[in-house]
Amino acid sequence: MSDNIQQLRDYSTRLIRMGESVSLLFWDQQTYMPTGAANVRAEQIAVMSEFIHKQRTSDEAHKLLVNAEADAKSFDPDSDDARLVAQTRRHYDLMTKLPSEFVAELSRQQALGHEVWVQARKENSFAKFAPTLERIFDLTRQKSEYYGYKDHIYTALLDEYETGTTYTDVVNVFSEMKPYAVALAHAIAASTNPVDSSPIIGEFDIPTQRALTLKVVKQLGFDFNRGRQDEAAHPFCSNASRDDVRLTTRFDRTYLQQALYASLHEAGHGMYEQGSPERLEGTILAGGTSLGVHESQSRLWENLVGRSRSFSKWVFPIVKDHFPQLKNTDAEGFYRAVNKVEPSFIRVEADEVTYNLHILLRFEMECELLTGKLAFKDVPEAWNAKMTEYLGITPSTDSEGCLQDVHWSEGLIGYFPTYTLGNLISAQLFHALRREHPNIEADFETGDFAPVLSWLRENVHSHGAKFLPHEVVLKATGEPLNSKYYVDYLNTKFGDIYAL
Amino acid sequence: MSDNIQQLRDYSTRLIRMGESVSLLFWDQQTYMPTGAANVRAEQIAVMSEFIHKQRTSDEAHKLLVNAEADAKSFDPDSDDARLVAQTRRHYDLMTKLPSEFVAELSRQQALGHEVWVQARKENSFAKFAPTLERIFDLTRQKSEYYGYKDHIYTALLDEYETGTTYTDVVNVFSEMKPYAVALAHAIAASTNPVDSSPIIGEFDIPTQRALTLKVVKQLGFDFNRGRQDEAAHPFCSNASRDDVRLTTRFDRTYLQQALYASLHEAGHGMYEQGSPERLEGTILAGGTSLGVHESQSRLWENLVGRSRSFSKWVFPIVKDHFPQLKNTDAEGFYRAVNKVEPSFIRVEADEVTYNLHILLRFEMECELLTGKLAFKDVPEAWNAKMTEYLGITPSTDSEGCLQDVHWSEGLIGYFPTYTLGNLISAQLFHALRREHPNIEADFETGDFAPVLSWLRENVHSHGAKFLPHEVVLKATGEPLNSKYYVDYLNTKFGDIYAL
């Protein structure tokens, strides 16, 4: 490694370690922080974020980058060092567009916004949240203007989460997915072979649920020596290096599926972070490459693995051990129950068929709020109208409507479409995995998930954030993103379950 | 407030917010952090500590300080602003003596040391800890040399925790306390009215213990809206502002006193931090003034309040509600049990009479290790010899001997004597409080602790860290530190219990 590269790397490692501290402040805020600390926490986060931003855009940072770029000209463009320099340049150019004070203010409002959202959701009152939401959208709009964009304001935001994907790409994905999802949902609604979800509805003691989720997550391959699982109002995964990965989940005493599948989902994120290669640790090439690829990992474990028939054969006896009340069900009954398709209010609980319609709704509303087509006060009404149009059901409260997601309160705008991209990628990856391991699902029946994890380690995790999302998809599957695999997966699976 | 003062204050607030983030990293390390994250956590802490140190000793910090000092000349020397400037000068002068790289290295070794200690204690092997201990003492010795000292190397260390107190002061305190404690312990050993501690020994379910500690701590006046209680291997209290105060406790399934009184103790620390005045928040004058005064708060609640006969009258029925197995005991029996005097191995579980002998042992050993009179490999032997000499008992393992305390592993050397100072101050404060409220203990019987807390708020907490420890003692009690009050307190209390 050249001296210049080493210096660039060392400079950046220090800021990454500080950034990890900020991640922990956010994690703590959502898990253990006492309520009364919300304001001071926002200050702590704002100060740290501003400082990190200043250091990343300092003259010294620029000088180190320019020196490293001079050396990098002679490197293989796919080498770690060349990619490190190129990614640092991309980040530097983006970050220098934002004033440090703006970064501080944005992160302060994100931290404050979270608390207001928690309270508003508890009181079921969007009106309480509206001024905060407007402030966050204003700052977000300002951020897009700082970044600049060619086609649409949304592209500027999306690019932070899914580099290379544009507003038009998302519109195209949804113009394919929407009629397909609606048609499939209609066919299922008309099916003569309905699914009975009653086995997983009832009374399920929370400590026992917790024990069950920990057992399953451990079996998947999540390393509890380098991570943990806690509870949060809205499940997430955060990390402070590959050695400190924090999953969260939430429990519903009356609905067994909630915590179990949220845990599988977050563990998918967590195993991606834990699988980031050691050689990239402490650099900007560590961790996941994008939210879309991240979501492909969580959805692959949650759905392609966790909601498969063969997984049910393994997990059901364990579930029954924890909850003997399921004694009148069998693995097939459990498999069907966790795959019931039915329009519902809460995105994170939505089935695989209707899920993307929830995303479409959010994507459209974000665009309308950003471009001023929709007023903030009208959010609940607009939300409910779209729910009625796409899913045929109307939320009766804000909490089961527009207040359900944590994202907007934390300034995560332009983020939702990555969930749908993640779904598409998950099916494409699983297809590629199955080409190499045609009998992979037989392993699930015995609780052996090592072949899946090791394939993902090799084909996805081992790249860290070195390659852009579309490069990772191409490397792992041999072709660009293709929604065909997801459509085929849904058709086959639900065609079978609902005898279509 | 002058512009210069405001600028000094703003500059410092930002660094305090970052320091609070470091506190949370330490808290997390001792409560929830996965084991595998120990190394990266040490890096996170080192980077942050080095940065904070650099900013506190920067040219800009110096310029702001000099400007503020010019303004402060015309201020009342006891005003907030004058004290803010004076304390900033004191800190600045101390901190500029340490190179930033040294600060980083010290904090890195402190974070790493903690993990090594946890492991060594678990394996009951001092040999595993010895090299770490030696490294930490080397760095500590180096720190004292950077600081400089006149009388004794120990004074340089002590001054960080208890400004104004010297090695000689500590020697003098112990030359008074040691013969007194030994004589009292002997008299008690010869008493014909022994104490029966069997009611608090047995099998006590941990979740029920947890519920009990939370109930009692809440009743004392600890504000759970601005704080919380968790578990740690070695109980401590840390805080990230007055609005985020974290207590920890530990549970012993077989010994009821452990968690209950550790909780009272840490709550005493916590209420001091929560009582720091709002007007000083975010300045270096916020929080507790010294470890000795801090310990006076924890010991006052733990012992002067918590181990009083009147407190037992209130708490015993609650304890019995939680643990019906105590039905054959009464409040007096409980009072006697929690006040049993008996030489024992573990400092934090020691009775009030023998406690200071545990401190003396540590003080002497620290001095010997610092001055090279004692070799690190000989620590267990020296420890056991002193235990035999002072307490007449000999630890059979390192874990019940020299590995019991967390302090050395975290570089907290020169810290232990503040525990004895805290004991003395606690009795002196309680004496002053009782002058104003002669019947204060009658309130304890009804669980009314508001008068104590409000007296402490007014006479101790409201000063934050504005005044030096000896000033606080003088202001609150009308006289300088005087060990007479502690001696009187012990004589009266144990004379009664043991019918001496």
Image (cartoon, coloured by chain):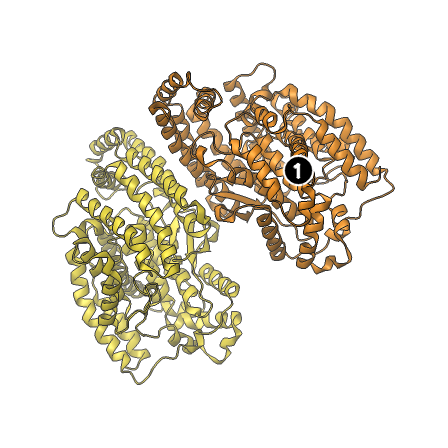
Chain colours: A yellow, B orange
Q: Where is residue B362 in the image (x, y as percent from the top left)?
A: 66, 30
* Above or below for B119 versus B202: above
**Does any portion of residue B235 appear in the rendered image?**
no
Q: Is residue A163 left or right of residue A232?
A: left
Along the line of sight, the residue nearer the viewer: B253 or B306: B306
Q: Is residue B263 left or right of residue A21?
A: right
Along the line of sight, the residue nearer the viewer: A204 or A105: A105
Under circle 1, the secondary element is loop
Q: Is residue A305 left or right of residue B110?
A: left
Q: In this view, does B462 lie to the left or right of A178?
A: right
Q: Where is residue A178 in the image (x, y as percent from the top left)?
A: 20, 68
Q: Position of residue A341 (x, y in %)?
A: 32, 74
Q: Identify which residue is drawn at 24% across, 58% down.
A: A377
Q: In which quarter of the image is the C terminus of chain B?
A: top right
Local crowd size for mark 1, using a 10 Å CA cut-off: few (<14), some (14–19), many (≥20): some
Along the line of sight, the residue nearer the viewer: B6 or A223: B6
Residue A498 location, quadrant: bottom left
Along the line of sight, the residue nearer the viewer: B226 or A266: B226
What residue is shown with label 1?
A: B437
Q: Where is residue A269 in the image (x, y as percent from the top left)?
A: 36, 55
